Amino acid sequence: MPAMPDTSTHGAASGASPAPGAAPERIEIQVLRYAPGGGAPATQSWTIPWTRDMSVLQALQYIKDHLDGSLTFRWSCRMAICGSCGMMVNGVPRLGCETFLRDLAPGPVRLEALAHFPIERDLVVDAEDFIGKLAKIKPYIVPKEPRGLDEGTYFQTPEELARYESFSHCINCMLCYAACPQYGLDPKFLGPGATALLHRYNCDSRDGAREERMDLVHSEEGVWSCTAVGYCSEVCPKAVDPASAVNQNKTASALDWFARFLPGRK
Amino acid sequence: MAIRRTYLRPMDGWWRRDPFFLRYMAREATSVFVVAYALILLWGLVRLAEGEARFDAWLAWLASPLSVAFHVLLLAVFAYHTWSWFAIMPKTMPPVVVGGRRLPARAITAAGVAVAVAASAALFALATVLA
């Protein structure tokens, strides 16, 4: 067993540091593993030494580096901004990098790939469905009319910014999809994350593609598949509040429907 | 591209996986009791149309121990229904800005519950006066 990195915070959970040379505390990490073509997923567990500053992601890295190199998981930034390391931690969708073992001690810690997505291998899911949905909502500003460089930059008031800013904080981590039973029951549902981003562009004063996006909102797989469970907003690591975006668009969709009866509207 | 051999986990018993889902299912289940009470009131209306004797019989049924027990259950379920409805309400409406600041979700929920309590108290007071 290789030596653990020395950390001054070790043992602080019990309010006291262990004596120098004392054996490090150990925690059991259970992972639902799946290998393509290898039958149904099965749980494998490892007991590893841990310190108070270790995240779930670091626990996985420890296992991969020292115990089992075949363990597969995604990660990149280690600071909750890339959205790669989403997984079910004790049944709750979390980012592995910002979930700390000290909050899960004494364990065991059960890790599983994000719920509702097909498992590609171990903790890696097939995200193609979400990526496709992301492309569908036109996640970019479509100018209202052509604008030349000589006309200068766009200006927005703080109020105009506030209308969409919180929804622009989405990091595409898909935790909200793992929290949404409606998506799990019917993956055709556009889902919380993509709808939050759709709402973000629809609320932007510079954008002119609201009508195109609303076709998606009105459709069978649009906002009406949501039953207001609300768990998506609970698990969002960036406080985007996708449930609010979806439900505000139910109102918008209903108003658009009634607006058809007004004179001069199609 | 290689064929992907992914594994999709079943959704059986999904609502038992998380206490949040249990609370959600409880909220949804309260709607059955709301319908049940609406039917009781509708039944009373039908009895009223049928004449005084039939309406009095309906009132007598309302005072029966079984009916009282059911109404106590209804009261508890309606209280949860009301609370859960106002708890999700902030997510169903556009941001409310008061004095340049966004009204927190908790304030919206609290206001909703307060209005429901006040309306119920007013209705109860009115019923007491009329009785």
Image (cartoon, helix red, strand yellow):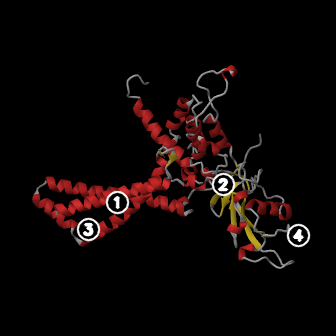
Between circles 2 and 4, the one closer to the viewer is 4
Mark 2 or mark 4, which has the lower sequence index? 4
Between circles 4 and 3, the one closer to the viewer is 4
Circle 3 is placed at which residue position?
Answer: B67
Between circles 4 and 1, the one closer to the viewer is 1
Pick the quarter of the image with the C terminus of chain A.
top left
Circle 1 is placed at which residue position?
Answer: B117
Chain for disc number 2: A
Q: The residue tagged with tag 4: helix, strand or loop?
A: loop
Chain for disc number 3: B
Chain for disc number 4: A
Q: Position of residue A250 (x, y in %)?
A: 47, 41
Inspect the image, locate mark 1, and give the three-letter code of the amino acid beneath it: Val
Marks 1 and 3 belong to one chain = yes
Q: Decide: few, some or many residues near mark 1? Use Cα within 10 Å; few <14, some 14-19, many ≥20.
A: some
Residue farthest to the right, as pictured: A2
* Residues at marks 2 and 1, CA–CA distance in whole angstroms: 41 Å
- Does residue A8 lie above or below B54 as drawn? below
Inspect the image, locate mark 4, and give the three-letter code of the amino acid beneath it: Ala
Circle 2 is placed at which residue position?
Answer: A114
Marks 2 and 1 belong to one chain = no
The answer to whether residue A257 is seen in the rendering is yes
* Residues at marks 2 and 4, CA–CA distance in whole angstroms: 32 Å
Q: Decide: few, some or many residues near mark 3? Use Cα within 10 Å; few <14, some 14-19, many ≥20.
A: few
B38 vs A8, left or right, is left
Q: Which residue is nearer to you in this view: B67 or A86?
A: A86
Between circles 2 and 1, the one closer to the viewer is 1
Inspect the image, locate mark 2, and give the three-letter code of the amino acid beneath it: Leu
Mark 1 or mark 3, which has the lower sequence index? 3
